[in-house]
Structure formats: structure tokens, C-alpha cells
Amino acid sequence: MALILALADAFVLLIVAGQIGALLTIGLVVLTALVGSLLVRSEGRATLQRLQRRLQNFEAPTDELLDGVLIILGGGFLITPGLLTDLTGFLFVIPFTRAPLRVALKRWVITPSVREKLRNGSLNVQVGGTLGNTRSDTGFGGEGRTRNTTTDESYYDLDDDMYDVEDERSS
């Protein structure tokens, strides 16, 4: 895929150079790299500030983390010489074009991945406390037992309440 993008980028550069000249084409590539680096820096700082605010308010910074990933990827595209890579980089960095990419990333990558891990029982869920400790459970019937929360895959620590989750693999 990278080879196809590089060849397409070279082809576009040749077409543009044929239309406006080689010197202007080189200037355009340098200009987009400079503008892109300034935009990446600005958007990165703004995203970092939003992330810190969310953390201070004890909120999950999901969108800010995804924005950070997209900005880093966009920065990589922007420093790569070429007009197609620059266009891709700008799409990843500019806020109003990044938002739909973030939504698509959630819908088609993150949500299916989380669902698959939940289905396979390989996702540990915990709110508060320390993952991997041993806890005593009196259960609903009052029977006392001790569980190792690191090795017991059917154990999910949801703060002070304990829940058993039926594991399809053990049935």
C-alpha cells in the first residue's frame, strides 16, 4: 500500500510540475510541510490541554486520545514529501475533517475490537481498586470464598461490587 501511495504521489508531483514548473512544485511541497508542522504543533497543544482538562475532571479522554493518534499520523504524512501525502496529513490534522475520521475509527476499529475481546473474555474491566489483588466474596447466597482477580477470567472488578460473568468457554 505504501508503494502505491509513493508511486501515486510521484505521479501527481510530475503532473503538477508539468503544469506550474519544477521550482514552484518544490516550493509548494516545502510550504505545505511548513504550514503542516505549524498546524500539527497547534492542534497537538490544544488536544493536550483538552486531555489534561478531562483527566482533571475524572472523565475518560477517549476523543482526545484518538485525536492525538490522528494528529501524530497526520504529522507523519505532512513531513513526507508529496502532495497526496500532504493532503492526507491535512485531513488527519484539521479539526473539522479529523472529527469524522475519529467517529469512523471508533465505529469500525475500536468498537468491534472491544466487542471481540468481550466476546472472547480477554478484556478485564475494573473501576477503582487495584487489578490483580485477592478479594473475599460473600456472594448473594452468603458463601464465602477468596478469588485471585489476576487469574480468574470471569472476575470483573466494578469498584466495591463484585459480579460473576459466565464464561462461554467453560460451559
Image: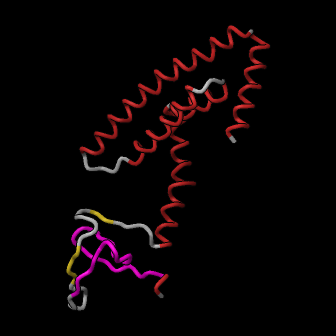
How many dots with numbers?
0
Residue 4: % across, % down: 73, 37
Q: Position of residue 32 (x, y in %)?
A: 58, 19
Magenta run includes residue 164: yes
Q: How is the image coloured?
A: secondary structure
The quadrant of the image that shows the N terminus is top right
Q: Nearer the viewer, residue 152 or 63?
A: 152
Residue 49 placed where, x, y %?
32, 34
**Residue that appears at 74% across and 31% down:** 8
Residue span colored magenta: 145-168
Task: Locate residue 102 relative to residue 165 in the image: left or right.
Answer: right
Q: Residue at x 73, y 25 (%)?
A: 10
Residue 146 placed where, x, y %? 23, 83
Left or right for 158, reference 76: left
Q: Does 154 sit above or below residue 85?
A: below
Check residue 34 for magenta coloring: no
Q: Is residue 85 above or below residue 18?
A: below
Tell me where residue 16 sits by quadrant. Answer: top right
Tell me if residue 32 comes above or below residue 133 in the rendering: above
Q: Is residue 87 left or right of residue 148?
A: right
Q: Is residue 119 left or right of residue 138?
A: right
Q: Quadrant of residue 56?
A: top left
Task: Name which residue lies at 23% across and 75% down.
Answer: 134
Q: Residue at x 62, y 23 (%)?
A: 81
